[in-house]
Image (cartoon, grey):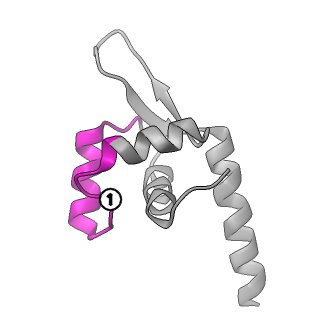
Amino acid sequence: MKITNTEFNVLKVMAEKDIDWTWMILDRTLATRGIPGFSNVANIVTNLMNEGMVDAVYNENSSRPRYRVSEQGHQLLGQINGVTRHNDI
């Protein structure tokens, strides 16, 4: 598994809130925070899905999928945060 820094930063943003993200809302969030990935969200989220970091969520109210961080994505973030915290001590 290999994800880019931009993909990792997008994953972190998605994990901050327990919501099902649309591309438009995620794109707007990245733009307002000045996080790279703005206007390329569809490709980034697709790559994260292919790596198992993000799941597509479908519901009956929308024909378009929404996206949320998968269990594997949360595990990766937890591992990296644990390493970061350990190194900060």
Name the quadrant of the C terminus: bottom right
Residue 76 x/y as whole percent:
68, 55
- The question of residue 33 being in magenta is answered with yes
The one nearer the camera, 43 or 29, is 43
Where is residue 62, by image quadrant?
top left
Residue, x 30% and y 21% (percent of image)? 64
Residue 73 x/y as whole percent:
62, 47
Residue 88 x/y as whole percent:
71, 88
Is 41 placed left or right of 5 in the picture? left
Residue 80 x/y as whole percent:
69, 66
Residue, x 71% and y 50% (percent of image)? 75
Residue, x 42% and y 42% (percent of image)? 45
Identify residue for label 1: 37
Query: Residue extending furthest top?
Result: 60
Element at badge 1?
loop
The one nearer the camera, 52 or 58, is 52
Where is residue 23, by image quadrant?
top left
Q: Is residue 31 above or below residue 57?
A: below
- The question of residue 57 being in magenta is answered with no
Where is residue 83, by image quadrant?
bottom right
What number of labels is visible? 1
**How many C-alpha atoms fall within 10 Å of the one at disc 1: few (<14), some, or many (≥20)?**
many
Q: Magenta segment range? A: 20-42
Callout 1, which amino acid?
Gly
